[in-house]
């Protein structure tokens, strides 16, 4: 067995140290990421994506920062002004504001760790939602989901800028009340729906009655107009018959008798069995004719 000499051991150690040094000098940064370099505990520079070099003896990677979008879900409870507990489940989408050196320095040094930043963000969202909901009643909360999100986003805009971040989106996915409150709200909605249905039904009945009354009124007017026109035509016909008979020198009782017979036939056909008394004398017929002729003059 051969043993290594001191010189050989020294050479091997030296080569190992050189390899380790070379390994520590070079590092890579992933796409959409940045590395913050410190030297003796003080900020030195920022390295972008790709293959990079640093002094392994004086420089170290303090923090790697991703500028990609990040998300988290949070759950918490708030209380309305009428003392109803509301459970919220929210989705928060955020990211580093930009890739400038000033912004990346804020992200690297404002908080001791990412966990501290996450905790601060969660507590800020919870506090702003609770403050907003505390001014609303339980029956208002469900209808102002977007207003709550907008109010919280506006509240967080300034502090997030100071920390080097931006809020991309805040979604309030679930808003739940206690079971007893949900039941009571469902009963209120059901009662409101019944009231609305009854109102519409009453409106429909009223409209139907109005339309029916209008139709009956129009029918009466049409019948009256038709009867008036019929009377006028009859009177005009009698008048012409009277003039023609008078011109040829015939007895006018012939006209009266003819109209009397026609009237009797019509009464028999449409009288429904009722008894009708008519004056069939020549004087009575002439009197009827004169009355109808007077009616014709009034209509004209």
Image: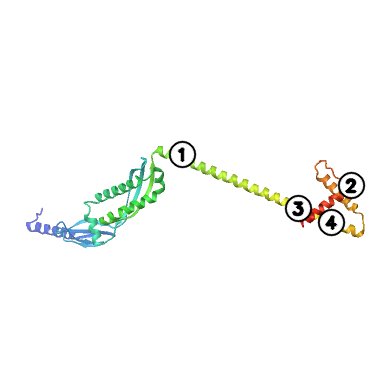
Quarter holding residue 139: top left
Spatial CA distance of label 2 from label 1 is: 82 Å
Q: Decide: marks 4, 2 in contact (CB < 8 A)? A: no
| Other residues around mark 2 within 10 Å, as few (<14) / some (14–19) / many (≥20) | few
The percent coordinates of residue 43 (x first, y second) are 18, 59
What residue did someone put label 2 on? 281
Q: Earlier in the sequence, mark 1 or mark 4?
A: 1
| Other residues around mark 3 within 10 Å, as few (<14) / some (14–19) / many (≥20) | some
Q: Earlier in the sequence, mark 2 or mark 3?
A: 3
Q: In the image shown, does 92 or 148 lie closer to the viewer?
A: 148
What residue did someone put label 4 on? 239
Q: In the image shown, does 37 or 205 lie closer to the viewer?
A: 205
The percent coordinates of residue 285 (x first, y second) are 87, 49
Say left or right for 12 vs 149.
left
| Other residues around mark 1 within 10 Å, as few (<14) / some (14–19) / many (≥20) | few
Spatial CA distance of label 4 from label 2 is: 19 Å
Q: Decide: marks 2, 3 in contact (CB < 8 A)? A: no
Say left or right for 126 vs 105.
right
Spatial CA distance of label 1 from label 4 is: 78 Å
Q: Decide: marks 3, 4 in contact (CB < 8 A)? A: no
Say left or right for 203 vs 72.
right
- Numbered tag placed on residue 187 in the rendering: 1
């Amino acid at each position: 067995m051969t043993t290594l000499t001191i010189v050989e051991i020294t050479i091997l150690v030296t080569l190992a140290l050189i390899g380790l040094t070379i390994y520590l000098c070079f590092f890579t940064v992933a796409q959409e990421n940045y590395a913050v370099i410190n030297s003796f505990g003080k900020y030195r520079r920022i390295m972008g994506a790709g293959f990079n070099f640093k002094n392994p003896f004086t420089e170290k990677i303090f923090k790697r920062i991703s500028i990609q979008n990040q998300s988290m879900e949070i759950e918490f409870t708030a209380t309305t002004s009428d003392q109803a507990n509301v459970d919220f489940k929210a989705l928060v989408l955020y990211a580093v504001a930009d890739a400038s050196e000033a912004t990346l320095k804020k992200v690297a040094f404002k908080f001791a760790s990412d966990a501290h930043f996450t905790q601060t963000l969660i507590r800020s969202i919870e506090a702003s939602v609770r403050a907003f909901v505390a001014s609303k009643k339980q029956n208002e909360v469900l209808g102002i989901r977007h207003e709550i999100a907008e109010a919280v986003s506006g509240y967080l805009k300034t502090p997030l800028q100071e920390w080097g971040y931006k809020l991309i989106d805040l979604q309030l996915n679930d808003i739940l009340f206690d079971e007893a409150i949900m039941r009571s709200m469902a009963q209120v909605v059901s009662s409101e729906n019944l009231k609305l249905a009854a109102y519409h039904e009453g409106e429909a009945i009223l409209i139907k009655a109005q339309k029916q009354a209008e139709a009956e009124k129009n029918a009466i007017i049409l019948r009256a107009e038709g009867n008036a026109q019929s009377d006028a035509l009859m009177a005009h016909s009698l008048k012409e018959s009277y003039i023609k008979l008078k011109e040829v020198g015939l007895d006018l009782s012939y006209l009266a008798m003819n109209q009397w017979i026609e009237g009797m036939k019509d009464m028999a056909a449409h009288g429904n069995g009722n008894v009708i008394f008519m004056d069939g004398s020549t004087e009575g017929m002439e009197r009827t004719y004169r009355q109808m002729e007077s009616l014709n003059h009034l209509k004209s």
